[in-house]
């Protein structure tokens, strides 16, 4: 049984916690890169900006206090945009591109992007967590919850009871909720 780990943001208060930083980088690099590309940066410039943001976050996150009323990703996006503007002021020709579009209520594209990011975050977290579970536990959860196969079918294939499939699914999903507690809006 897994104990509840401290939240990822709490773990990042220590710049020396390499496991937490690897997990954070793995989870958030695609989003930061996506935002950097949205301001019009070429791939290599976007990668440079993302690297600069992570360098800044190593200094900033130990002081960061999560506010449930404000979104972490909004703060992270602001950090990226401020770093982009700072670089533009220093080297106007280095990074070109426009502002990210402002989100508006009812903006279907923004809602879809948010849903896509949440799915990406959940899948990426599951990939990172897979090693924490026995292969049969993992497979039972994946086949039942992610693929959508009936518990009885998964149980028969894996040689376990239907109840064991439900328990495996519950354990993995509970761990996923713990992992993403600070990442959901």
Image (cartoon, rainbow, N blue to C red):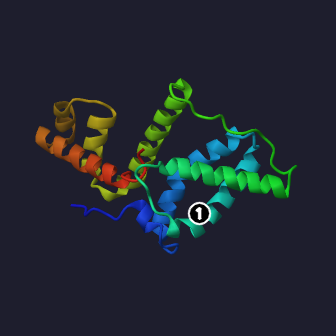
Q: Which of 155 and 101 is in front in this view?
A: 101
The answer, for residue 161, to whether it is visible in the render is no
Across and down, in percent, residue 121 comes to 46, 45
Across and down, in percent, residue 68 comes to 40, 52
Q: Give the residue at x 18% y 41%.
A: 165
Q: Is mark 1 on a helix, strand or loop?
A: helix
Q: Nearer the viewer, residue 19 or 87?
A: 87
**Left or right: 157 with respect to 28?**
left
**Left or right: 173 with respect to 14?**
left
17, above or below 121, in the image: below
The answer, for residue 168, to whether it is visible in the render is yes
Across and down, in percent, residue 60 comes to 57, 66
Q: Which of 78 and 145 is in front in this view?
A: 78
Image quadrant where one finds the C terminus: top left
**Left or right: 34 with respect to 89?**
left
Q: Give the residue at x 54% y 26%.
A: 107
Q: In which quarter of the image is residue 6?
A: bottom left
Q: Name the residue under label 1.
A: 57
* Crowd band around label 1 with a 10 angstrom C-alpha radius: few (<14), some (14–19), many (20+): some
29, above or below 120, in the image: below
Total numbered badges shown on the rendered structure? 1
Across and down, in percent, residue 90 comes to 83, 58
Image quadrant where one finds the N terminus: bottom left
Outermost residue toward the right? 93
Q: Give the residue at x 29% y 53%.
A: 175
Q: Nearer the viewer, residue 165 or 22?
A: 22
């Amino acid at each position: 049984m897994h104990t509840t780990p401290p939240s990822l943001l709490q773990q990042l208060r220590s710049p020396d916690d390499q496991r937490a930083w690897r997990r954070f980088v793995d989870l958030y690099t695609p989003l930061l890169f996506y935002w950097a590309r949205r301001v019009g940066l070429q791939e290599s410039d976007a990668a440079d900006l993302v690297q600069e943001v992570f360098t800044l976050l190593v200094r900033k996150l130990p002081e960061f206090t999560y506010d449930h009323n404000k979104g972490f990703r909004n703060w992270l996006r602001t950090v990226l945009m401020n770093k982009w503007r700072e670089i533009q002021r220093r080297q106007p020709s280095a990074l070109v591109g426009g502002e990210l579009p402002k989100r508006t209520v009812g903006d279907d594209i923004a809602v879809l992007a948010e849903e896509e990011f949440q799915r990406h975050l959940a899948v990426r977290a599951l990939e990172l967590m897979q090693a924490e579970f026995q292969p049969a536990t993992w497979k039972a959860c994946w086949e039942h919850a992610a693929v959508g196969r009936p518990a009885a079918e998964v149980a028969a294939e894996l040689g376990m009871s239907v109840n064991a499939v439900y328990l495996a699914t519950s354990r993995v999903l509970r761990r996923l909720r713990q992992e993403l507690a600070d990442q959901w809006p």
